Image (cartoon, rainbow, N blue to C red):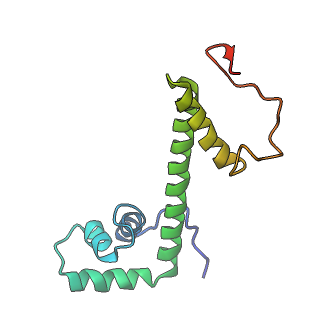
């Protein structure tokens, strides 16, 4: 049997909705994810049984893992964009510097002050004037 690509939506719409709900809004709560995906009034026992049945399927687990990874990438991209915006447009220099330090931690060393690989020739300027 050919392995399914987890980046592709599942053919069964209930299964796809379950994966999206489990990976996102309902985070790790199979009962809530199944109830949300089915859109039906179910007993907790029925929802648990159906969620358990789906979670045993490898294609369901792989799809959930893929969706989680995509969520993290999306969230991280948003955070990076927001930090870049703050570093460029914040009114206070201290806010700009904090945003730059956060970006440096994301892309570089954990300790910007003691990182010997950081270039000493970088000059940071705000509003056209170099900071001393």
Q: Quadrant of the N terminus?
A: bottom right
Q: Is residue 128 left or right of residue 89?
A: right
Question: Please, which residue is most extreme toward the front here?
Answer: 132
Q: Which residue is more in the foreground, 31 or 16?
A: 31
Q: Quadrant of the C terminus?
A: top right
Residue 82 vertical position relative to residue 20 in the rendered view, above or below = above
| Residue sitting at x 83%, y 29% | 121
Residue 128 vertical position relative to residue 90 in the rendered view, above or below = above
Q: How many marks?
A: 0
Q: Which residue is more in the foreground, 21 or 1?
A: 21
Residue 96 occupies which quadrant of the picture?
top right
Q: Position of residue 61 (x, y in %)?
A: 49, 75
| Residue sitting at x 69%, y 46% | 107
Q: Which residue is more in the foreground, 117 or 47?
A: 117
Q: Position of residue 27 (x, y in %)?
A: 38, 67
| Residue sitting at x 60%, y 76% | 3
| Residue sitting at x 60%, y 33% | 97
Residue 87 vertical position relative to residue 128 in the rendered view, above or below = below
Question: Please, which residue is most extreme toward the top here?
Answer: 128
Q: Is residue 16 left or right of residue 69?
A: left
Q: Is residue 8 visible?
A: no
Residue 126 occupies which quadrant of the picture?
top right
Q: Position of residue 75 (x, y in %)?
A: 50, 50
Q: Is residue 94 visible?
A: yes
Residue 88 vertical position relative to residue 64 in the rendered view, above or below = above
Q: Position of residue 85 (x, y in %)?
A: 54, 30
């Amino acid at each position: 049997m050919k392995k399914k690509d987890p980046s592709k939506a599942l053919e069964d719409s209930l299964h796809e909705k379950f994966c999206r709900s489990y990976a996102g809004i309902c985070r790790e709560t199979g009962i809530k994810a199944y109830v949300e995906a089915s859109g039906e009034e179910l007993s907790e026992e029925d929802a648990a049984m159906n969620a358990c049945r789906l979670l045993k399927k490898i294609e369901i687990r792989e799809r959930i893992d893929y969706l989680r990874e995509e969520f993290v990438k999306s969230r991280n991209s948003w955070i990076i964009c927001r930090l870049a915006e703050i570093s460029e447009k914040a009114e206070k220099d201290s806010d700009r510097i904090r945003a730059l330090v956060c970006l440096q931690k994301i892309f570089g060393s954990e300790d910007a002050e003691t990182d010997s690989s950081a270039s000493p020739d970088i000059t940071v300027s705000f509003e056209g004037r170099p900071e001393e």
